[in-house]
Image (tube, rainbow, N blue to C red):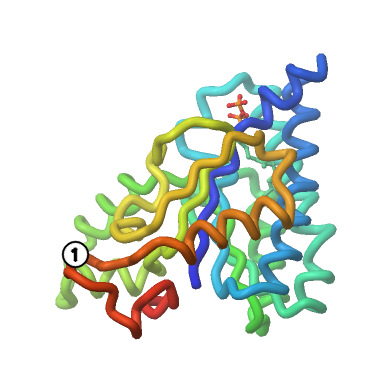
């Protein structure tokens, strides 16, 4: 089963507490840890987290720098635990605009965790779904468009969760979410935890997935069979 999360609300979480936005992102990183641990224990095979969209470059320089530092520290501090827990980490998105030290941390984590089979954790950094689709379309070649997308790691999403009360996709996994069940959570991302994930999974299991047909196909019903 592939779960994707738009982690929204760090800034509002912080400002409600009279804290700088960066404190919200730091609390958001702790929520990432909790969520990855819960996902690795549960029925989730793939977890894709929207960490930084290509539109986020327009944020103040300080905030962007803080986020990039947070990603790097996260990769460095969590790699050993990921290896221990069978979590394979992959980063999707552009790398040519990231700092060399972050790219190095990404490559190192991807290499060290590549044997993980329990959970694939995909972090979307400098990611734009439209751009990924445009690139695949422009790449051409002998294979079909759908084959190229699959080769680029575009995996169908079963459940897409967005925290923070907004109800939009914000250029995240547009192709992959064609048949995703959408769950919107009012809580801000730093407050997301194992219970919130369980609740979202609960909602997902109550939905009837028909994939455009008339009745739920038993073999496809909430099974994540399209991996
Ligand atoms: C959106 O909240 C969140 C982001 C742009 C950054 C997401 C980053 C993290 C959760 C930090 C840690 C991530 C990893 C992978 C270690 P917002 O800042 O737009 O919140 P707002 O809508 O309340 O302003």
Q: Left or right of 180: which side holds 163?
A: right
Estimate the x, y position of residue 168 in percent, counting from the top left.
40, 36
Compare residues 194 and 133 and report the one nearer the observer. Answer: 194
Estimate the x, y position of residue 195 in percent, counting from the top left.
72, 54
Quadrant of res 60: top right
Compare residues 34 and 107 and report the one nearer the observer. Answer: 34
Quadrant, the C terminus: bottom left
Q: Is residue 84 visible?
A: yes
Q: Left or right of 111: which side holds 210?
A: left
Quadrant of res 42: bottom right
Estimate the x, y position of residue 191 in percent, counting from the top left.
74, 40
Compare residues 143 and 158 and report the one nearer the observer. Answer: 158
Q: Which residue is mark 1?
A: 212
Residue 17 sits above or below residue 80 on the image:
above
Q: Residue drawn 75% across and 48% down? A: 31
Residue 81 sits above or below residue 96 on the image:
below
Looking at the image, the residue that sits furthest to the top is 18
Q: Residue drawn 36% across and 48% down? A: 129
Residue 15 sits above or below residue 71 on the image:
above
Quadrant of res 38: bottom right
Quick one: label 1, few (<14), some, or many (20+) residues within 10 Å? few
Q: How many marks?
A: 1
Q: Residue drawn 68% across and 31% down? A: 10
Q: Left or right of 116: which side holds 223?
A: left
State the SS at label 1.
Answer: loop
Badge 1 residue CB within 8 Å of ligand 1: no
Estimate the x, y position of residue 24 in percent, counting from the top left.
75, 30
Q: Is residue 97 visible?
A: no
Q: Left or right of 164: which side holds 25?
A: right
Q: Residue drawn 37% across and 67% down? A: 156
Split into quadrants, the picture shows ligand 1 in the one at top right
């Amino acid at each position: 089963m592939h779960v994707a999360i738009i982690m929204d609300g760090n800034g509002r979480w912080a400002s409600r507490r009279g804290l700088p936005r960066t404190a919200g992102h730091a609390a958001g990183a702790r929520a990432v840890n909790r969520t990855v641990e819960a996902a690795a224990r549960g029925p989730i095979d793939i977890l894709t987290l929207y960490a930084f969209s290509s539109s986020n470059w327009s944020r103040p320089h300080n905030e962007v720098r803080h986020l990039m530092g947070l990603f790097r520290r996260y990769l460095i501090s969590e790699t050993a635990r990921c290896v221990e827990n069978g979590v394979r980490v992959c980063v999707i998105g552009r790398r040519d605009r990231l700092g060399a030290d972050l790219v190095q941390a990404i490559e190192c984590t991807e290499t060290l965790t590549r044997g993980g089979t329990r959970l694939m954790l995909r972090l979307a950094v400098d990611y734009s779904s439209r751009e990924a689709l445009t690139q695949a379309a422009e790449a051409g070649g002998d294979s079909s468009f759908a084959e190229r997308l699959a080769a680029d790691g575009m995996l169908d999403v079963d459940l897409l969760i967005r925290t923070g009360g907004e109800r939009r996709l914000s250029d995240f996994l547009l192709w992959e979410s064609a048949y995703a069940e959408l769950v919107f959570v009012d809580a801000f991302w730093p407050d997301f935890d194992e219970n919130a994930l369980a609740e979202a999974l609960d909602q997902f299991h109550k939905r009837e997935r028909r994939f455009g047909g008339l009745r739920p196909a038993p073999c496809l019903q909430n099974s994540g069979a399209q991996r």
